[in-house]
Image (spheres, rainbow, N blue to C red):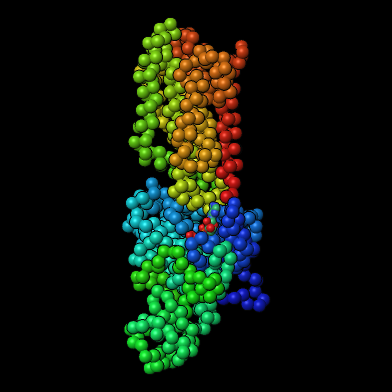
Amino acid sequence: MSLRPSPAPASAGTAPVVPSIRATDLRKRYADVTAVDGIDLTVAPGESFGFLGPNGAGKTTTIAMLCTLAAPTSGRVEIAGHDTRTDPAGARRSLGMVFQETTLDGDLTAAENLRFHADLYDVPVAEVHARIDETLALVGLTGHRDRLVRTYSGGMRRRLEIARALLHRPQVLFLDEPTIGLDPQARARVWRHLRQVCRSERVTLFLTTHYLDEADQCDRIAIIDDGRIVAEGVPDELKSVLGADRIDLRTADDAAAARLLRERLGLDVTTGPYGLSVRVTDSTRVLRRIFTELDVFVHEAKVVPPSLDDVFLHHTGHRIRDGVPAEPDAPSPGPEPVTGPPTGPAPAGPVPRGLRAELRALRMVWRREILHFARDRTGTAISLLQPLLFLFVFGAGVAGLLPTAGGGPAYQLFLFSGILLMAAQGPAVSVGSSVLWDRQNGFLREMLVSPVRRGTLLIGKCLGGTTAATCQAALLLTAATPIGVPFDPGLYALLLVELVLTALAMTAFGVLAATLIGRPQTFGTALTVFMAPLTFLSGAMFPLAAMPTWMAALALINPLSYAVDGMRRTVAAYLPGPQGPLFQQLSWGHWHPPVLAEWTLITLAALLGLLLAARRFSRPS
Ligand SMILES: Nc1ncnc2c1ncn2[C@@H]1O[C@H](COP(=O)(O)OP(=O)(O)OP(=O)(O)O)[C@@H](O)[C@H]1O
């Protein structure tokens, strides 16, 4: 029984078949744990290969190395002939991945999740709609295409993830515990769809599982324990090597029955939770003797053919299910044999990506950030409230203390550029937290396992944050006229340029901070603690001239000071008449850097932040 007909071996004279997966002496060591300890395996094109082992055996770590998400400590992996170390993009283009935990974006619809995937993998634009429809139909989700994924059940998410992994027609589909956590009905549905997929798409399947019935249906399996492969082969052959059935008995007196089985039938008896067990090669004959020669009443006798669990026990001395959740005892949802040739076309080999494909992926990552921003209206309203309160409440209050500086209107005009900075700050730095939430929710892995350059992903996210931040600050421009900022398209255009540069610098900083902090729960607090002094030291709320010398010196090395100063000077240039002392320009001694120099400095700060963030982001785990 198998998921599909096994691939025909390469005949003499034909070109050698490139294995879909080849791993050589693969090892992964964490600080004090050897998770994978020298694995060798080869999986042929079109084969279904099960990787069976108990919790903690090293299955997920192996699959993470095979699909390029974790760097091996040593050893080599090739996916469809692409070495994952020297050609990770080639390997990524050839594989589809269904992770153990969900990696969908719950705030996007099913169709949007698939569209995102299509753009990451550069699926031909003309085919995207048809492929989305096809794959949704394949997994029975056509009627749910426009629902937000967070409203899906666990089983529906799994099916959607399988659809998504197949969308770009990979040569190899990796499934890490595809049915874990699902109830028997959902398991059955997932397998039904997986079978259908195998029938219509000619992909190599590599699945990890600790469900024996799932592994049993694969063309070949490897059994892994403690990071090592302890047995490998065709399931039936592995079982037949054991050469014996097990007879489980429940009797009226187990102790007496065990003694008689040993003395009269010469059998080796073990006791287990079920009762007594004996292993025999001729179960029919032995059963007859048990019922005729045993002077103990037998309530129940069960012949159990050797299972993969027995194979596991034989090779490791313990059972696979020791310490793992019980297998659902509903009718086996495992795959049934599929007969007949696959109906779909063979997946095409990967096409090298160019700049256009990277730009397409970048646009999609950018678009996702914008979608999140646009859908979070409450968040936008709340983060706009803070700068408005500063402008109209704090600004009005402090203005009363500064009669000599030109009174309330002058202070509010002074404060305005600082307020624009504050308005842009929220969405800009929150891209950092979005990176961390993507990691926590798993979506980051969907991006990282794709062939898109990591720098492209990061820039897409930063540009998304920059756009959201600029939009939010631009909303505040509408508050400019009542406080006396003249309505002039030239002024607004210049302010928008400055806002874009400032938002880009803050976004890059936010992402860099995220790669350093690592936990979304800590990120918000850490950033508030860091951003508050940077804002105070930027001249956003009081002029640099009013600061003590040490503070003014610090302000001069704060890039935000140049952003605020640039915007303030731009506003001042459009105000009638000379401005009061509040509008004194930032200076190095007697030198006032020109606005263009300030823009350049902010741009350099943004590029430096992006570069550092991209370097950290691209590090393999
Ligand atoms: N990032 C990590 N840091 C340290 N140890 C790790 C890390 N990831 C995995 N391990 C350890 O490596 C071993 C193998 O873990 P792995 O997740 O690969 O097992 P598994 O077979 O997939 O288990 P499960 O069936 O529970 O998913 C375990 O001992 C685990 O604790």
Which residue ends up furthest to the top in the rendered image?
Answer: 404
The residue at the point 45 percent across, 13 percent down is: 575
Determine which quarter of the picture holds residue 261: bottom left
Q: Position of residue 483 (x, y in %)?
A: 37, 17
Q: Position of residue 163 (x, y in %)?
A: 43, 59
Is residue 556 visible in the rendered structure shown here?
A: yes
Is residue 22 visible in the rendered structure shown here?
A: no
Q: Where is residue 65 in the image (x, y as percent from the top left)?
A: 57, 57
Residue 46 falls left or right of residue 72: left
Q: Position of residue 621 (x, y in %)?
A: 57, 50
Vertical arrangement, residue 76 with respect to residue 438, above or below? below
Vertical arrangement, residue 469 with respect to residue 272, above or below? above
The residue at the point 58 percent across, 56 percent down is: 33
Which residue ends up furthest to the right in the rendered image?
Answer: 13
Residue 46 falls left or right of residue 101: right
Residue 496 falls left or right of residue 380: right
